[in-house]
């Protein structure tokens, strides 16, 4: 699931970069800030995924924080005058599913050896 999330946030980053170059944003500062934040999220998710493959203990905390942020983004996509349920519901569902998977005994066992990595 973390790999799928990394792929999705990477696609969003690419779209934002292309839009930044090809289109004129209403606010350049906002467009740049959003693009930088999404690029930071790509780096965060990539580091988390690498740490997961190495069985490092910190990755569960990182992934849990990401799921909470993703849940907030999904919830925000469902509210307000610019609500996007087509985006919000999948984001919420993936966040909740991944959050639950992070507490499976096999995942906990695989990420609790602090001597690795």
Image (spheres, rainbow, N blue to C red):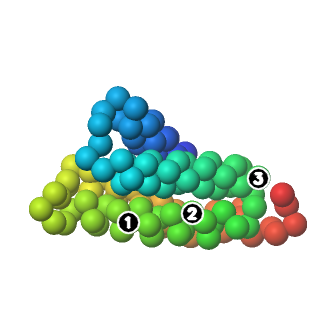
Q: Is residue 115 above or below residue 27?
A: below
At horizontal 29% and vertical 42% (from top left) the residue drawn is 25
Circle 1 sits on which residue?
71
Which numbered disc, 1 or 3, marks the residue that appears first in the sequence? Answer: 3
Foreground: disc 1 or disc 3:
1
Q: Which mark is residue 63?
A: 2
Placement of 26 over or under 66, stated as above or below: above
Residue 56 picture location, percent across and down: 75, 61
Q: Is residue 47 left or right of residue 40?
A: right
- Label 2, residues with CA under 10 Å away: few <14, some 14-19, many ≥20: many
Question: Taking 92 as reference, is 58 left or right?
Answer: right
Q: Is residue 46 positioned above or below 114 on the image?
A: above
Q: Secondary structure at mark 2?
A: helix
Q: Toward the viewer: 18 or 10?
A: 18
* Residue 54 numbered tag: 3
Q: What element does badge 1 sit on?
A: helix
């Amino acid at each position: 699931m973390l790999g799928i999330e990394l792929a999705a946030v990477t696609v969003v980053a690419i779209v934002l970069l292309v839009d930044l170059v090809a289109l004129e944003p209403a606010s350049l500062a906002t467009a740049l800030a959003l693009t930088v934040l999404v690029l930071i999220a790509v780096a965060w998710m990539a580091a988390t995924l690498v740490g997961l493959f190495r069985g490092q203990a910190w990755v569960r905390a990182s992934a849990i924080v990401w799921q909470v942020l993703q849940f907030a983004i999904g919830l925000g996509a469902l509210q307000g005058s610019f609500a996007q349920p087509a985006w919000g519901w999948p984001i919420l569902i993936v966040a909740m599913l991944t959050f639950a998977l992070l507490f499976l005994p096999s995942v906990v066992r695989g990420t609790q050896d602090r001597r690795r990595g």
